[in-house]
Image (cartoon, rainbow, N blue to C red):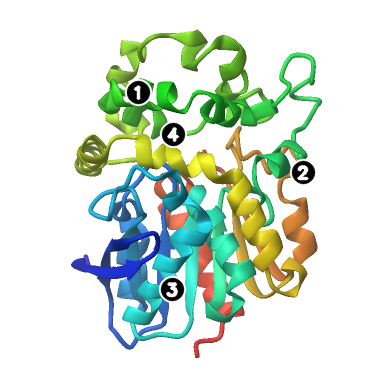
Amino acid sequence: MSAFTEHSVTYTANGEKELHYISAGPTEGQLLIFIHGWPAIAKTWKHQLTAFANLGFRVVALDMPGYGKSTVTRNLEDYSHEVIITGLLALLKALGKEKAVWLGHDWGAGVVSSLAVVHPEVCQGIVLMAVPSHSLELGLEELLKTVNRDVYPESEYPFGQWDYQVYYERNFEEATAFFDKDIFGFTRAIYSKGKPANLGQPALTAKVVQDGGWFGGAKELPKMFHNIPIENLVLDEELFHEVVAAMEKTGFWSANAYYMNHKLNREYNLQKGKNNAVLDFPVLFIEAKWDTVCATATSTLADSMRQHCKQLTEVSIEAGHWVALDKPEETNAAIAKWLADEVKDS
């Protein structure tokens, strides 16, 4: 196994900030930068970091702003894509490279999509897992256009599977306090493996507003989630406890703040995007087939990506939302093939 070394880069965006990152592989290798989503840390990419470092790539994964050992603030705008991308560009410069292959999952995929549209000059290619481009980075109003009304009749599910994000916008402090009450239990619930039976079924996220909170408006997380066996999670025991410790250190305020910047992110893309948001470099989208929220298999969520990406490769993997953790070998194989077939090192 490749050993990870720890580093940090300092940059200025709404004040001085620090990005913590881990790296492995030969410094002269082609650069792959991994961007995690909600809620995670750099180490959740360990399967990919180890595999691609051993293949001769230079691999880097960061604790995103507000997570792990990176700077945590209580300013919502610090978690907008524009501010975050200032840090990513500083990281790239510190690594001595002009371009990289950027790989993102969940909110990380949204950030990578913004980076690709606004700063295509730094992208050799991008990999998006679970969340396609031209969707999340354009805000909640864009996501709502993609709801499958056969699965989510408007009279019953006005916001479809994106309902929970509306709840966060309306009840940010309450939503955050609910997560912070039981970080151990939430981490176990959030990192549970997906199930094929979920495909085409309404997500648990679709009634949070009308229920007045998660799990029917419960005041705290049901204790049954503490008893989920480790084999039903996408994390091993060691990584599970690392994620819990990291989230207990930062709390969920900064993690949830990513959801509070939909309008700013949309404005950033529409005002500063290049080439009419058309991407003319290689893009790999890895679908998490059993994902009921980012439900590309049963909705139009990926349609705009297909219209705007001129060198698009799509791979579907039978997994839940955490595709790179749930099915690491299949994920790594898809990335490796795409890198060999589509991406030129320069």
**Type of residue at label 2?**
Thr
Residue at the spot of label 2: 300
Depth-wise, is mark 1 or mark 2 nearer the camera? 1
SS for callout 3: helix
**Type of residue at label 3?**
Leu
Depth-wise, is mark 2 or mark 3 nearer the camera? 3
Within 10 Å of disc 2 (Cα), the crowding (few <14, some 14-19, many 20+) is some
SS for callout 1: helix
Residue 85 - label: none
Residue at the spot of label 3: 89
Mark 1 touches mark 2? (CB < 8 Å): no
- Residue 163, horizontal then vertical, whole percent: 62, 26
Number of numbered discs = 4
Q: Is residue 11 visible?
A: yes
Mark 4 touches mark 3? (CB < 8 Å): no
Residue 177 - label: 1
Depth-wise, is mark 2 or mark 4 nearer the camera? 2
Who comes first in sequence, dot 1 or dot 4?
1
- Residue 192, horizontal then vertical, whole percent: 40, 31
- Residue 25, horizontal then vertical, whole percent: 28, 76
Who comes first in sequence, dot 2 or dot 3?
3
Quadrant showing the N terminus = bottom left
Q: Residue visible at 80% across and 61% down?
A: 307
Separation of disc 2 and disc 4 at Cα? 24 Å
Query: For this rendering, which residue is in front, 115 or 16?
Result: 16
